[in-house]
Amino acid sequence: MTAPVFPPGRYGRRRSRRAYPRWLVPALVGAVVVAGLAIAGKLYSTYGDDHVEGRVLRYAVVSDREVRIEFEVSGSRETPMTCAVRSRGQDGAEVGRTEFTVPEGDSVITRTVTLATSQRAVSGEAGGCTPAG
């Protein structure tokens, strides 16, 4: 049996055969998905949720160049943590920031930090905690 012959130019161009096997695209997509999951797992284990919560209990603007922030860290800490607090000015720009280290343990730790600012602060905020390193 021979292939049918169509009149030239009547039915458009015929497609040529694929230059690659059918399984190649799904295999490449699968490899990219597996690599993405591996990278996501590594990043989560390094920077992910460690069940440590830092929050500001209260803050007070002491002067035009200083704010006092009372900060609480709770949760189980297997390693020392570095926690950040910051302050913002009237325009929303960050005017002061500092970091401090919290030792490992299960207890709730409260720290009061006096933060130097570049202009008058209107807020005291928790910047988060990450493993010290």
Image: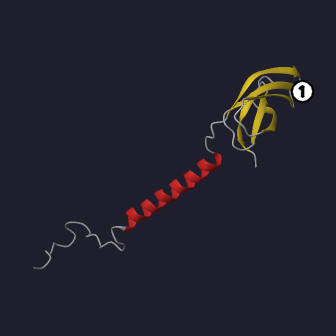
Indicate the quadrant where residue 86 lies. top right
Task: Give 8 or 121, whichever is nearer the viewer.
Answer: 121
Disc 1 is placed on an element classified as loop
Mark 1 crowdedness (10 Å alpha carbons): few <14, some 14-19, many ≥20: some
Q: Quadrant of the N terminus?
A: bottom left
Image point (30%, 73%), residue name: 17
User: Is 101 situated above or below 42?
Assistant: above
Image point (36%, 72%), residue name: 20
Whether residue 12 sits left or right of residue 4 in the image: it is right
Indicate the quadrant where residue 5 lies. bottom left
Task: Give 33 or 93, whichever is nearer the viewer.
Answer: 33
Q: How far across and how far down the image is residue 51, in percent? A: 62, 37
Whether residue 6 sits left or right of residue 28 in the image: it is left
Image point (20%, 66%), residue name: 11
- Answer whether residue 120 is visible to the viewer in this image: no
Name the residue tied to disc 1: 65
User: Is 80 situated above or below 43?
Assistant: above
Q: How far across and how far down the image is residue 55, in percent? A: 70, 28
Q: How far across and how far down the image is residue 120, in percent? A: 85, 24
